Image (cartoon, coloured by chain):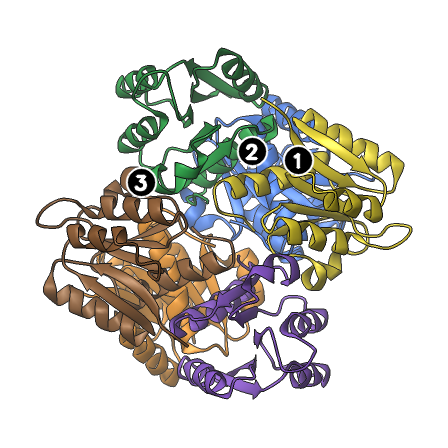
Chain colours: A orange, B blue, C green, D yellow, E brown, F purple
Amino acid sequence: MESVPILLAEDEALLLLDFEQALAEAGFSVIAVSSGRKAIALLNAGDASIQGIVTDIRFREPPDGWNVARVAREIDPEIPVVYVSGDSAPDWASKGVPNSIMLEKPFAMAQLVTAISQLLNGRSSGTTAP
Amino acid sequence: MESVPILLAEDEALLLLDFEQALAEAGFSVIAVSSGRKAIALLNAGDASIQGIVTDIRFREPPDGWNVARVAREIDPEIPVVYVSGDSAPDWASKGVPNSIMLEKPFAMAQLVTAISQLLNGRSSGTTAP
Amino acid sequence: MESVPILLAEDEALLLLDFEQALAEAGFSVIAVSSGRKAIALLNAGDASIQGIVTDIRFREPPDGWNVARVAREIDPEIPVVYVSGDSAPDWASKGVPNSIMLEKPFAMAQLVTAISQLLNGRSSGTTAP
Amino acid sequence: MESVPILLAEDEALLLLDFEQALAEAGFSVIAVSSGRKAIALLNAGDASIQGIVTDIRFREPPDGWNVARVAREIDPEIPVVYVSGDSAPDWASKGVPNSIMLEKPFAMAQLVTAISQLLNGRSSGTTAP
Amino acid sequence: MESVPILLAEDEALLLLDFEQALAEAGFSVIAVSSGRKAIALLNAGDASIQGIVTDIRFREPPDGWNVARVAREIDPEIPVVYVSGDSAPDWASKGVPNSIMLEKPFAMAQLVTAISQLLNGRSSGTTAP
Amino acid sequence: MESVPILLAEDEALLLLDFEQALAEAGFSVIAVSSGRKAIALLNAGDASIQGIVTDIRFREPPDGWNVARVAREIDPEIPVVYVSGDSAPDWASKGVPNSIMLEKPFAMAQLVTAISQLLNGRSSGTTAP
């Protein structure tokens, strides 16, 4: 099988490496970027192969992860979105997109892999949860 | 029992009456307004008794229903949100808040009552779905 | 608002009347037929306005309700399906379509209205459950 | 169709009448009792026709509604349970049974009807949510 | 603990090895077969220990994976079913069984493991989702 | 990132080691105890860092795992609870807490990791399922 490309946006280098490794071991192919700006540039470049988004909320400069997710959903209304954040979790209820998952740091790598897998599995089944 | 106040924002007068009647017959107490601006003013007035939001998306002037829902969720992160719209349903995936329901017009009154009931029931049980 | 047409297939005349009345009172517009054959003919006639299916399983002659649902889903993969049956409920796990609801007779009219409303609401929200 | 019997236990007479009427109008047949003791006696009498439980939490004397639900689930592990309570809602997470719904008073009658319908529909479909 | 036997039917040898390895590393014991015919033979042999099914849709000769799942569900109405397919995913809505998951190739191994785990966990809890 | 502490209570030493290893490999930090009594002592000591509970049901002496979960939920009403048991699974419907998962032994380690991850992910997203 070909791989399943996931767009990962995280500006803390060590976390980006951890997340990338966990997702790669789970069988995903990771396109890693270090800012929301680069993530949106990639999404707008129209790479139809991206199957899911994992994004931090706060980057050193705007746009933030809430924006990354909105742009991704404008392009593909059903794309799975996982937010990872230390301090922005309380804003998820007002700023997150529907059918997304917020992982509050710290979390275990299995939570990240389960979150993106669950959303992808729901998508192919025509059901997206939660 | 006291009643359960629902904030209803809709600028088409006939629809507002229909929705109000359906919700009242279902046992809710309806606070009806005809614009997003009035809805947000009411939310900001801090009436803690409002238990859920039913909002149209497009009003004659801004703010729109997406904004109404975000303001409501900033005040109460778990408040149930039902959007009703004729042509904005496709934007729900990028502009809606998590754990909300989008009803695309036309819909049956039972769908509106079921939607707000389901979200309220999920809330009191500590689970909000979908 | 225009109405939301639901296709109802039931060959017991009294039940068909009960279901039709309950759905109409809930705000749906009901297209009632008395056999699986007529239901499939209507679906194949390509009436794009049908938004949901409520079907009995056993009719006096084939096709049965399992077939009605499969034909409906071939035409519209996301159409809500509610089965109603007295004795075929145990076959739902092997013969039903995904994201459908089986109501075992006897059931209360509120269960029928809640079932179709829940599935319709899930559909417009991009999530279909269960 | 025959009716769907629901056991309703509530010791405030006015509420019991309200709930009974709402459930009856929804198409259920209600077996109403005014204490947890009577509810458990009925359950232990082995009336296999009871399809769901709606119970208050606090009665003038023990047993309470948490006990009613546990006894009902020992007899039928999949029976739908809806709790209604003014002040015991926070204890649901530790004292409630799985796949039950807690309605915190005040609530609208539509919430009660939706709650029991949703659980019953989930049951006949082999899925119980939430 | 003893192991949890999963029946895996896949006729592409390399994929079968990949899936088998992923499931074994996840702690499952895999009974691998290369055709729908062999899968159904095993199911009909009445091995009550099989706890879940992972099946391709198209095999070189009939029966197909839709049939495998139906036979499995006739024997055990609650058995978890995961379909894996490259080109048959769009037929899931009309040909799949309820409470199953369709994984469209390509997918990551973590998606397969999450899918079967989620369905098994739902089963033991009396709830199967989606 | 710091780690996510999970309280694990299991009195079969070999299983405790297996579970501990599976959870640690998944990225959790495990606080392992061999009895319900020790689990409750730890919970009552008020260690706010515990993020989830995995508990056996039967221990050599009381309290049992049903009690462990109830105490945990009294302290934190949203804490994820996974029960693991060989013979007490049928009692989950009457003795388990809401929004918990029962894993019946034998199960695969991936099921344990998926169960706790799913509940944790639901929690941070404001939705707990099932």
Determine contact: label 2, label 1, CB under 8 Å: yes
Disc 1: which residue? D113
D112 with respect to B112 (left or right):
right
Which residue type carries mark 2? Thr
Label 2: how many Cα within 10 Å (few below 14, some 14–19, many 20+): many
Residue B37 vertical placement versus E11 (above, below): above
Q: Position of residue C82 (x, y in %)?
A: 45, 31
Q: CA distance from mark 2 to mark 1?
A: 9 Å
Tell me the quadrant of the picture where the N terminus of chain E can be found: bottom left
A73 with respect to D129 (left or right):
left
Which residue type carries mark 1? Val
Disc 3: which residue? E93
Q: Secondary structure at mark 2?
A: helix
What residue is drawn where x is 34% and y is 48%? E75
Q: Position of residue D59 (x, y in %)?
A: 87, 50
Disc 2: which residue? C114
